[in-house]
């Protein structure tokens, strides 16, 4: 991969721990997140609901405030920028949300939705140039140019997601963040949208941060994968390395939880039921996964492991990864 476009360093996002917004208590929605993203690269971001994936995506774009850390865009910290400077850079950092209908204004025609980013970032374009750009983008995402006069309600979910992608692509971004962009779509449509994103990436050389629960889709599209649990990064590895030889107990649990016909072993037993709140309170110093891990030892409860490099481009946050380094079951997703 080329020189990173984006470097995230020690990023932390906090929210009030109680309903009272004036309380002094907070919890970390994400804590000490570090990664890089290069042009032309796709970084998959996985983890169960509540792990902090969407919060991380929004923090990168300053849609939610960060408590500390850096988000370096070509060496410049987005978190420290003035609003006017950030506004100019937003054209390079675009996002596609999970629900396409909710992210498209129902009162606007598709032509207006797609032209809006150009009016903001390229105000010198005349009406004819805007129309041509909109029509070309619709065709690029697999929709007829003649559909530009319709409203979002006149399209299917898959078509609306193509429109949402088209809107994000209008200012020619260098990084596209896809937050569960295919999860609400039928399986056949998911494949079409993933292939569309891949084709756009190959054509334009943009980077993708691809958030998904679907591990099969993540494996198909990603170059590297970052695994989050309870707001913390527990593993970061090249795609094939992570799926073929996961080092963290939680990553193994994610992979064995995917239904498959022939597993080498059953899913791991759990010390805590899935879906329970696993986030440690602010006074705890142990591993975030210790309440759920059947392999925990006193060391796991006493201190939090940091990401440790265990091979080329492979990092894991686990005190016991060496003892657990047996061959995992194959991933069939």
Image: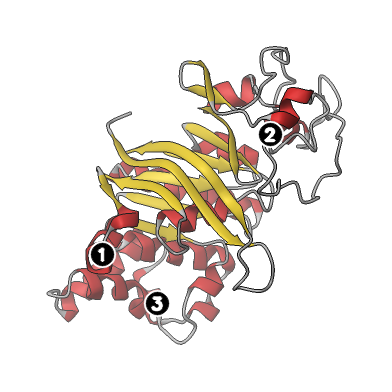
Residue beneath the point at 55% across and 73% down: 101
Could you tell me which quadrant the C terminus lies in?
Answer: top right
Q: Judge left or right: residue 158 versus residue 66.
A: right
Q: Is residue 79 left or right of residue 268?
A: left
Tag 1 and tag 2, C-beta contact below 8 Å = no
State the colouring used for the structure image. secondary structure
Task: Measuring from the top left, give residue 232's x and y in whole percent.
Answer: 59, 41
Dot 2, how many residues are within 10 Å of its Cα: few (below 14), some (14-19), or many (20+)?
many
Count residues near mark 3 (Cα–Cα under 10 Å), then give few for <14, some for 14-19, many for 20+: many
Mark 3 and mark 2 lie on one chain; the one further toward the N terminus is 3
Q: From what the image shows, is residue 128 above or below residue 13?
A: below
Eyeballing the image, is 131 above or below 161?
Answer: below
Q: Position of residue 328 (x, y in %)?
A: 72, 19
**Secondary element type, mark 2:** loop
Q: Earlier in the sequence, mark 3 or mark 1?
A: 1
The residue indicated by pointer 2 is: 287
Q: Determine which residue is flagged by label 3.
A: 110
Q: Secondary structure at mark 1?
A: loop
Q: CA distance from mark 3 to mark 1?
A: 32 Å
Q: Residue shown at 78%/24% (left/top)?
A: 298
Q: Which residue is under mark 1?
A: 82
């Amino acid at each position: 991969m080329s020189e990173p476009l984006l470097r995230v360093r020690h990023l932390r996002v906090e929210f009030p721990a109680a309903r009272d917004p004036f309380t002094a208590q907070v919890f970390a929605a994400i804590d000490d997140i570090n990664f890089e993203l290069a042009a032309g690269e796709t970084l998959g971001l996985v983890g169960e609901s509540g792990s902090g994936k969407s919060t991380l995506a929004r923090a990168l774009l300053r849609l939610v405030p960060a408590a500390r850390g850096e988000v370096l865009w070509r060496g410049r910290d987005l978190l420290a920028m003035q609003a006017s400077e950030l506004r100019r850079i937003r054209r390079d950092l675009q996002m596609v949300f999970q629900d396409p209908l909710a992210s498209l204004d129902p009162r606007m025609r598709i032509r207006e939705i797609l032209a809006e980013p150009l009016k903001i970032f390229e105000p010198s374009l005349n009406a004819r140039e805007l129309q041509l750009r909109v029509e070309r983008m619709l065709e690029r995402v697999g929709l007829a140019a003649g559909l530009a006069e319709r409203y979002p309600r006149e399209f299917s979910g898959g078509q609306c997601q193509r429109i949402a992608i088209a809107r994000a692509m209008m200012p020619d971004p260098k990084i596209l963040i896809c937050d569960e962009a295919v999860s609400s779509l039928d399986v056949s449509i998911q494949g079409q949208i993933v292939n569309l994103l891949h084709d756009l990436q190959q054509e334009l050389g943009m980077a993708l941060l691809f958030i998904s629960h679907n591990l099969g889709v993540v494996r198909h599209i990603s170059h590297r994968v970052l695994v989050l649990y309870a707001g913390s990064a527990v593993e970061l590895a090249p795609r094939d390395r992570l799926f073929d030889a996961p080092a963290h107990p939680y990553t193994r649990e994610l992979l064995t939880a995917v239904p498959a016909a022939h597993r080498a072993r059953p899913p791991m037993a759990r010390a805590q039921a899935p879906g329970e709140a696993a986030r440690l309170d602010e006074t705890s110093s142990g591993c975030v996964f210790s309440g759920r891990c059947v392999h925990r030892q006193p060391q796991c409860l006493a201190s939090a492991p940091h990401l440790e490099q265990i091979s080329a481009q492979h990092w894991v946050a686990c005190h016991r990864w060496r003892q657990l380094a047996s061959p995992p079951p194959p991933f069939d997703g």
